[in-house]
Every structure is written in structure tokens, then in C-alpha cells.
């Protein structure tokens, strides 16, 4: 399988059974986020087929994972409190990951899907976490390498994702952490825990 398949942004085939989810998603996000979601859906299918992930769950996760992204931060917080999932103390100073906390809740409240593993995959897709499921790791990777992503080094991660899932996961986790630190920002505790959990042999360098 060539890595160019991960750069294709046209000709994405959508299962007709997903139409209601796509219609709902279009009411929640802007065009840029919608195209990102389609790209993540496409990449989820490729990686699930390659590594044995559940295709149905992977398709839905790719589409839905950023469903809370286009809300204002104040709205995210209000909605989480409304659904009795208030932000934890460790989340309060990291508003850029609030959409993932909200998306995990909206999986059920907006899309009618009650699945704890899928909700957890959405909840931690920006940061990573300890003890992640296969589908959670695939989402973490797919979100980072889908076809609309265009940053220095993305092709290296696309190639790695098609050859070794675990290596790709660790490389992307480290790259995300390096990026945050290069901006002088603090890391979320979930990222730090994931680093120690998955990259033990190199944790002293971080």
C-alpha cells in the first residue's frame, strides 16, 4: 500500500448508513473541520483494515471525533456542565482539548451512540493516555496524518503509520509533546502519563 493513499482528498466513498451521522455533523462544524473529519474517516478505514480495528467503530470515530470543536470555549464548558461531565482540574488550563471532552459526551447525546471505548478514544485523541485501546491509538494517529494535514514531516508519519502502528503512535506522541514544548506551553497531564507509559526507554530525555 502506497502512502499516497493517505493524501487523497477526493473520491472518498461513504457508506450510505452513515448519512444521518454526516448530516448531523454538518450542522455542528464548519467546512474546514468537516473536511478534516472526512479525511480522518478515510484514514481510519485504511488503518483499521491494516491493523484489525473495527471498521464500523473506526468510521464513526473518524467522522465524529471533532464534533465539539467549533463551539466557543464558554459553550463547551457550559455543555459539559449541563451533561454532568464538568471539566477536571487538570483540564481547566488546557482549553484546546476541551472539544475532545465534549465530543466524548456528544457521541451519545448528539449521535445516539453509547459505547465507552469509543467515547474514551474521542476523549483522549488530542493528548493520548495510558492503556489506550487499539481503536484509540488508530484515531490518535489518523487525526494527525489525514489527507488535509500539511505540516513539515507529515509524510514521514504517514509512511510509518502504514508499516508499524506502535512506532507511529510513539513517534507522533513525542512530536506532539515536542511541538507544545517548543512554544513554551505546559503539557496536559495525560500527555505526560502517556509518554512515561509508552516511551519508557526514552523518558529521561523528556
Image (cartoon, rainbow, N blue to C red):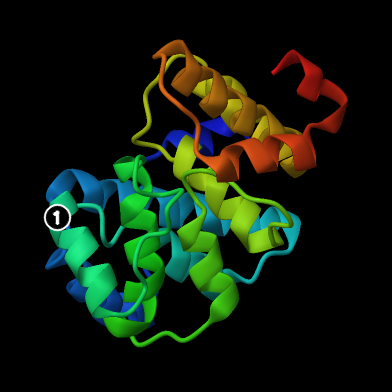
Task: Find numbered disc 1 in the image and state the secondary structure of the residue it sits on.
Answer: helix
Residue found at x 56% / y 42%: 189
Q: Position of residue 197 (x, y in %)?
A: 77, 42
Q: Position of residue 29 (x, y in %)?
A: 17, 57
Which of 169/155 is in front?
A: 169
Which of 147/115 is in front?
A: 115
Q: What residue sits right under mark 1 in the picture? A: 74
Q: Is residue 158 left or right of residue 100?
A: right
Residue found at x 37% / y 24%: 150
Residue found at x 19% / y 43%: 32
Image height of 183 relative to 193, above or below: above
Q: Position of residue 87 (x, y in %)?
A: 36, 60
Which of 46/154 is in front?
A: 154
Q: Quadrant of the N terminus?
A: top right
Residue found at x 23% / y 61%: 77
Q: Quadrant of residue 67?
A: bottom left
Q: Position of residue 70 (x, y in %)?
A: 17, 52
Q: Is residue 111 left or right of residue 135?
A: left
Image height of 125 relative to 177, above or below: below
Amino acid at each position: 500500500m502506497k502512502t499516497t493513499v493517505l493524501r487523497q482528498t477526493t473520491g472518498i466513498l461513504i457508506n450510505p448508513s452513515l448519512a444521518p451521522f454526516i448530516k448531523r455533523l454538518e450542522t455542528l462544524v464548519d467546512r474546514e473541520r468537516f473536511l478534516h473529519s472526512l479525511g480522518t474517516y478515510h484514514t481510519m478505514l485504511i488503518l483499521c483494515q491494516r491493523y484489525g480495528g473495527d471498521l464500523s467503530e473506526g468510521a464513526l470515530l473518524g467522522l465524529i471525533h471533532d464534533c465539539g470543536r467549533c463551539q466557543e470555549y464558554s459553550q463547551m464548558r457550559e455543555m459539559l456542565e449541563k451533561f454532568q461531565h464538568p471539566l477536571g482540574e487538570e483540564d481547566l488550563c488546557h482549553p484546546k482539548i476541551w472539544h475532545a471532552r465534549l465530543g466524548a459526551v456528544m457521541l451519545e447525546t448528539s449521535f445516539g451512540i453509547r459505547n465507552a471505548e469509543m467515547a474514551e478514544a474521542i476523549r483522549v485523541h488530542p493528548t493520548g493516555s495510558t492503556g489506550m485501546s487499539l481503536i484509540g491509538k488508530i484515531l490518535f494517529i489518523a487525526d494527525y496524518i489525514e489527507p488535509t494535514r500539511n505540516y513539515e514531516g507529515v509524510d514521514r508519519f504517514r509512511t510509518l503509520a502504514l508499516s508499524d502502528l506502535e512506532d507511529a503512535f510513539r513517534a507522533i506522541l513525542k512530536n506532539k509533546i515536542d511541538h507544545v514544548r517548543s512554544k513554551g506551553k505546559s503539557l496536559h497531564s495525560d500527555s505526560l502519563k502517556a509518554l512515561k507509559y509508552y516511551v519508557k526507554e526514552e523518558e529521561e530525555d523528556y
